[in-house]
Image (cartoon, helix red, strand yellow):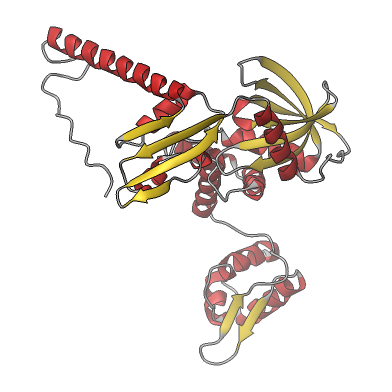
Amino acid sequence: MTDTPARLLSLLSLLQTPREWPGSELAERLGVSPRTIRRDIDRLRDLGYPVEATKGAIGGYRLVAGTAMPPLLLDDEEAVAIAVGLRAGAGHAIEGVDEASVRALAKLEQVLPSRLRHRVSTLQAATIPVTRGDGATIDPRTLTVMAGAVTGGERLRFGYRSGDGTETKRQVEPYRLVSTGWRWYLVAYDLAREDWRTFRVDRISEPFATGARFTPRELPTGDAAQFLRRSMSRRQSLTEVTEVEVSFAAPVEFVRARLPGYLGAPEPTGPGSCRLRTTTTDSLEWLALRLALVNCEFTVRQPAELTECLRELGARLVRAATATATATATTGGRGVTDEPADGPADQPDRGEG
């Protein structure tokens, strides 16, 4: 290999694998002499790559950790794996995945060749992850567009759907993306309203970076996470808060694993029972459904309105079951689906371990 830049990139790619490379093996891999390898190692060191050499019969070269991370070289499979992993984490707002992951995804997708972007998109479209369902699913491309606008200081346009369903068009100066662990929020200065706003990212549609640059303004609090907390506290104070108490006939670990974390942690009341005391701004209809999904016996202590919601939900489910049974009887046992009569029987649900 006579092309020095190409040879240096190939050498760097080899050294980024976690092993020690004898000079003779590197020379054989690259088709050059050991003397050329020594020169190339010196060139990499001059460029800031911390290459360490050991002497002796089993000595060789390896890349060690330095004070700054040099550019990484990834093969096709590695690049696809990292992009898919970052997309999955960003798209489902997994706890611990913060704005840095979104920035990394934005940078990686910007430099991916078109053939690899197609592979990433194809794999993502064909994969359905199992999630708890407590947070809203977000298209990772929405996050990467906004992350790029934040980093590049570009004004952003998008459609926004408020909590009551009102659709509006917004133009903002994006400041930061904030993850709460199960939802993403955009903190931005709204140009039309001439004030700071927080936007739930799952309610944002068709974000578009306009290319118009702006000088970042100073937040009232100086910290995006703190501003979001204050905004959510003000919003909660304007919303009706419901006090809830529910007793469960199941161990606390069982119930905790099946309740959304934002409702708080249940407390044990016995070896096979526990109790949840919390406040919520969720609708009682939604809360009734969440309690039913815990999949154990429970008793609502308060409020009485929640008991009524459960009664209505139960009656609706009974009506649906009755209607389904009737339809099955009138269609000769085939129900209302298109499953062939001699198709495979459903397997019983064995639950989790």
How far from the left and from the top, in percent, is residue 274?
37, 45
Drawn side of residue 322 relative to residue 275, left or right: left
Residue located 68% across and 21% down the image: 159
Residue at far bottom of view? 56
Toward the viewer: 139 or 311? Answer: 311
**In x, y percent, where is residue 173?**
80, 32
Residue 345 coordinates in the image, percent (x, y): 14, 29
Q: Residue at x 18, y 35 (%)?
A: 348
Location of residue 90 (image quadrant): top right
Q: Is residue 85 visible?
A: yes
Q: Is residue 253 visible?
A: no
Determine the image quadrant of residue 327: top left
Q: Nearer the viewer, residue 312 or 34?
A: 312
32 over 240 or under it: above or below: below
Farthest residue to the top: give it.
330
Position of residue 214 in the picture relative to residue 19 (left or right): right
Residue 200 in picture, x, y percent from top left: 64, 31
Q: Is residue 7 above or below residue 270?
A: below
Q: Write the residue at 76% across / 43% down.
A: 151
